Image (cartoon, helix red, strand yellow):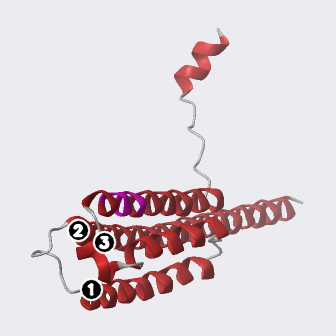
Amino acid sequence: MDDWISVVISCTGLLIVFIGWNVIYRNAKRIATRAETKSILDDIIKHINDIESNATNYWLSGRRERVDHENYELLLMAKRNVLASRIELLTIRNITVCDKSHDNLSNMFEYALLDCEAADQTSADKRREIAQNILNASTELVMSLYNNFAVHYRPQAEAKSIWRIIKGSF
């Protein structure tokens, strides 16, 4: 009878160890996936900020400092292709990029590229308005992407400290 009890206790301990390893593995996998996805999102944000900076510099700079519009269009379209591939990586990782994000991305490039060949003939007020529209669209795009990330990877609720629990119960 004692042999049987010791075998059950040994098997129970082994089962608890395997269950613990499984929980730790799943948690580590989830944390690593979240960190990798956050890294992709940060890279996307960096590219959006770079596009925003190039576009606002183009529209706000003077005629002598402004690059040629063909070079500007080529640069922004190349950055758009890189941005689209990074956003596709988010989609593969089940971070839905909603229609609002696509609308904001389209708006940002529409403001940045539409009539850029006529920037020299455009009034300073109109160029400032275009630059502000680019900034607004890029800000909305970044917020939309962060919100989609937060929906998929909800932030953990803050754990209550033992002192708050004890203090609250007395």
Instruction: Please tell me which residue lies in front, 169 or 82.
Output: 82
Instruction: Using the image, determine if residue 57 lies above or below residue 146.
Output: below
Along the horizontal axis of the image, is 143 left or right of 24? left
Circle 2 sits on which residue?
A: 57
Q: Quadrant of residue 72?
A: bottom left
Which segment is the magenta one?
A: 128-133
Q: Quadrant of residue 69?
A: bottom left
Report how far apart the C-alphas of labels 1 and 3 lie in the structure: 11 Å
Label 3 sits on what residue type? Answer: Ala
At 30% from the left and 56% from the top, the residue drawn is 125
Report how far apart the C-alphas of labels 2 and 3 lie in the structure: 5 Å
Q: Quadrant of the N terminus?
A: bottom right
Q: Which mark is residue 55?
A: 3
> Which secondary structure lies at badge 1?
helix
Label 1 sits on what residue type? Answer: His
Q: Nearer the viewer, mark 2 or mark 1?
A: 1
Q: Estimate the x, y position of residue 104 in percent, counting from the top left.
A: 54, 67
Q: Quadrant of the C terminus?
A: top right
Q: Nearer the viewer, mark 1 or mark 3?
A: 1
Residue 28 inside the magenta-drawn segment: no
Instruction: Using the image, determine if residue 133 lies above or below residue 169.
Output: below
Q: Which mark is residue 69?
A: 1
* Mark nearer the N terminus (1 vs 3): 3
> Which secondary structure lies at badge 2?
helix
Label 2 sits on what residue type? Answer: Asn
> Which secondary structure lies at badge 3?
helix
- Classified by dominant secondary structure, the portion drawn in magenta counts as helix
- In the rendered image, the residue lying farthest to the left is 64
Pointer 3: residues within 10 angstroms few (<14), some, or many (20+)? many
